[in-house]
Amino acid sequence: MIQRLTYNLRALLIAFMAVVVCGADALAQVPVVSGSLSKDSVEVGDHFDYTIDVEVDVATQWAPPTYGKLLTRQQRDSLNAAKLAMSTYKEYNDDILEVIEDYPIDTLKVDGRRLHLRKRYRLAVMETGNIPFVPVIAYLEKNRDKADTLYSPDTLRLTVKGYEELDTTLFIKFDPATNGIVVDSLAARQKLRDAGLFAQKDLPFIFAEIKDYVIYGAISLILFGLLAWAVVVMLLRYLRNRRLAPPPAPKIPPHVVANKALIELGHRKLWQKGKFKAYYTALTSILRTYISGRWNVGALEMTTDEIIVALRDKDMPSQSRNDLITILRTADMVKFAKAEPEAEDNEENLNRALYFVENTKLASGERYEGKQVINIETNIQD
């Protein structure tokens, strides 16, 4: 009997301790929220600080109020979705309050598992009256899927004073001269003076009020003057260099370039040294360059057959056309079949090239103006 009683008492004690521990743990996870205002009364447009202090367990997720004007479109949509899920979550009206600065959350103290945090906003008020502030946070306890809101038990109040209002209907009078109704400007001005407001012309000139504009204006004027001076200097330098620059050299006619290159090729004596491929590669390259300049044909990228087809409708002696074909065909045999023509053929192909250029060069009426003199003697006159 005594043993059973002891067992029951022990079970009750364990259950009681479990309830106490669980309750303490649950209590420890519930945040504590409070708030404060840097000023209790302001005028319309004034700035003030709104501070929310939160004491929360390290395992509890929480979020302070978010003001819409600081959010991106995606963040705003996410916040609206959160409001639908937590209908008690409140957001201050953007028409009344304007966010000047949203400061990051500060950690004031760490006490074991409890964190003492602070969230601060710099706000501007845009409406008169007595505006209530109820510090509120959204929080999500550990091992829970549903978020909740927590309001401070104390309501903060901000008194917003308005500017002096002036009703012009109080200052109308009858004008006997015009038999009409006019505004008594003297009475209106006196009302403004009594309210501490003065017309601009009655106020003394204070340079300190405009010194920033004067300084910025002077700096802007100096910078603009330096920029204008730099542009003028660059323009004058460009015009001077353009005036002093030598005129471009006249373009050398294609047949002159070709004649010079052919004579130089003959002086190099490549085929005499057994360099047949180098000789015929240079020879056909000279002719291809000449054809490109003479008839505006892309001969440098063409094959032998393509060049023959491209020149089919060009006006030239039949002998010159045959000479060109002979040179190109012989060059193909040397470059691709490693042929080694006889000495007479090599010398004759150079002469064929010289006569081809001479017999197909531009007519006298088509000559380039300002033709340069080539300081290499040739057997074929330009």
Image (spheres, rainbow, N blue to C red):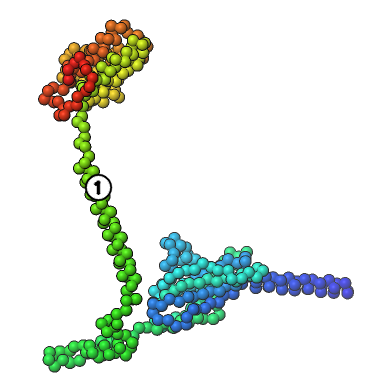
Judged left or right of residue 76, residue 9 is: right
Q: Nearer the viewer, residue 24 or 110?
A: 110
Judged left or right of residue 279, residue 176 is: left
Q: Position of residue 147 (x, y in %)?
A: 56, 67
Instruction: Examine the rendered structure and indicate whether residue 266 appears above or below residue 186.
Output: above
Q: Position of residue 168 (x, y in %)?
A: 25, 87
Q: Position of residue 195 (x, y in %)?
A: 33, 88
* Residue visible at 23% across and 43% down in the picture: 241
Judged left or right of residue 85, residue 19 is: right
Q: Quadrant of residue 12?
A: bottom right
Q: Which residue has dot 1 on it?
A: 237
Instruction: Examine the rendered structure and indicate whether residue 42 appears above or below residue 279.
Output: below
Where, quadrant-wise, is the N terminus in this rendering? Answer: bottom right
Q: Total number of numbered labels? A: 1
Q: Nearer the viewer, residue 290 or 7?
A: 290
Neighbor class of circle 1 (other Cα within 10 Å; few <14, some 14-19, many 20+) is few
